[in-house]
Amino acid sequence: MSSTSLEETGPTTGTTGIDKVRDWILGRHPERTELGHDVNLIESRLVDSLSFVELVYAIEDASGTEIDFDAIDIEDFQTLASIEKAFFA
């Protein structure tokens, strides 16, 4: 089975899941070709208030878990490293 069909079978965890989130962010910023694990997504304006909800949905899709909007800690969304720790560990 190819890696493409593995990704198409449903939500994944670990490296593949965080790669999906990275790809989603990079897809919104075609001027960027890479994204470091420790880049602050909010301060660098890669994720703004308008795209934050979409980011949450991208993380839910990639992780296969629902995120409670009432219990969101913004620190969990600052970097790819913090997203990975909070939702893919």
Image: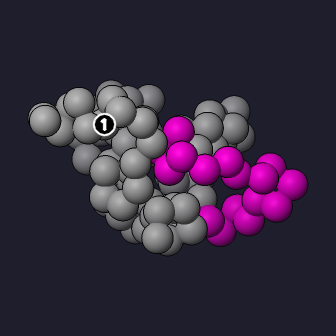
Residue 56 belongs to magenta span: no
Q: Is residue 40 left or right of residue 70?
A: left
Which SS class for mark 1?
Answer: helix
Viewer-proximal residue, 62 or 36? 62
Disc 1 marks a residue whose amino acid type is: Glu
Q: Quadrant of the N terminus?
A: top left
Instruction: Tell me the residue at 42%/36% (across/down).
Output: 10
- In screen coordinates, is 55 left or right of 3? right
Q: Which residue is tagged 1?
A: 7
**Whether residue 23 is situated above or below residue 65 in the rendered picture:** above
Q: Quadrant of residue 36?
A: bottom left
Q: Residues within 10 Å of mark 1 (few under 14, many from 20)?
A: some
Placement of 30 over or under 82, stated as above or below: above
Expressed as whole percent of the image width and height from the top left, the position of residue 89 reads 46, 70
x 35%, y 33%: residue:
9
- Using the rendered image of the protein, determine whether residue 67 is visible from the camera's viewpoint: yes
Residue pictured at 41% horizontal, 56% vertical: 13
Q: Is residue 60 above or below residue 2?
A: below
User: Residue at position x 31%, y 58% from top?
Assistant: 15
Where on the picture, by quarter, is residue 4?
Answer: top left
Of 19 and 33, the residue lying toward us: 19
Residue 49, position as x, y percentages in the image: 71, 40
Residue 28 location (% of width, % of height): 44, 29
Q: Over which residues does the magenta segment extend? A: 61-76
Q: Is residue 70 above or below residue 62?
A: below
Find the residue positioned furthest to the right: 70
Q: Nearer the viewer, residue 55 or 47?
A: 55
Instruction: Count numbered badges in the picture.
Output: 1
